[in-house]
Image (cartoon, helix red, strand yellow):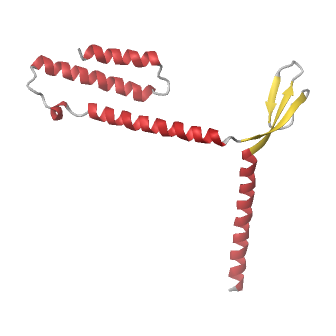
């Protein structure tokens, strides 16, 4: 029985040592040294270790993380999340089948125009979903103009 407790104690001590080591590493991430070195060509280089061979150190500073940056990043992520949710709700409302919306006594040509308009919106939304990271403002305007043309 005493042998088992020694094994458990050793395991717990190992876990504590690992946690303390990880904590020490995380502390290093919050504050780091930054050096500005000048190469023989005169070009500046910024490094966190020693200056490269052949260069000389201009200055050295301790850099700490700015907590305001984390807050601004969190706010930006929240804004993006809210925009995505609103966009998904809008898209879902547009993608409801036309039958659920009701025909409202439309003629055949009105119905075909509504289908063409709906298809143009779906195409625009598919392209936006696919290319949203690379989408330019001009491309968004172009897609919206195509929908306007189809929905006339």
Residue 24 percent coordinates (x, y): 75, 54
Quadrant occupied by the N terminus: bottom right
- Residue drawn 21% across the image and 33% down it: 97
Left or right, residue 20 beside residue 134? right
> What is the total number of numbered labels drawn onto the structure image?
0
Decide: is 89 above or below 135. Answer: below
Quadrant showing the C terminus: top left
Task: Tell me if residue 122 comes above or below residue 26 in the rendering.
Answer: above
Residue drawn at point x = 26 percent, y = 16 percent: 150
Can you say whether 131 is above or below 66 in the image?
above
Determine the residue located farthest toward the front in the rendered image: 68
Q: Viewer-proximal residue, 130 or 64?
A: 64
Instruction: Give the residue furthest to the bottom.
Output: 1
Relative to the observer, which residue lies in front, 1 or 36? 36
151 vs 37: above or below: above
- Across and down, in percent, residue 136 comes to 48, 19
Residue 17, quarter of the rendered image: bottom right
Examine the image and state in which quarter residue 56 appears. top right
Q: Position of residue 117 (x, y in %)?
A: 24, 21
Residue 145 spot, x, y in % from top left: 34, 14
Instruction: Using the image as rendered, state which of residue 83 and residue 111 is in the foreground.
Output: 83
Question: Residue at 63% of width from left, 38% of height from top?
Answer: 69
Residue 2 as seen in the image, left or right of residue 144: right
């Amino acid at each position: 029985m005493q042998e088992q407790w020694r094994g458990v104690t050793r395991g717990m001590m190992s876990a504590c040592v690992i946690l303390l080591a990880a904590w020490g590493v995380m502390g290093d991430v919050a504050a780091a040294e930054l050096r500005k070195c000048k190469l023989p060509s005169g070009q500046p280089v910024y490094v966190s270790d020693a200056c490269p061979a052949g260069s000389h150190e201009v200055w050295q500073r301790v850099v700490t993380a700015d907590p305001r940056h984390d807050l601004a990043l969190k706010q930006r992520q929240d804004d993006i999340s809210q925009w995505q949710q609103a966009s998904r709700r809008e898209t879902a409302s547009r993608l409801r089948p036309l039958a659920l919306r009701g025909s409202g006594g439309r003629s055949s040509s009105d119905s075909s125009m509504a289908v063409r308009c709906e298809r143009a919106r779906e195409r625009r939304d598919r392209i936006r979903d696919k290319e949203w990271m690379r989408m330019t403002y001009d491309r968004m305007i172009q897609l919206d103009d195509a929908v306007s043309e189809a929905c006339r």
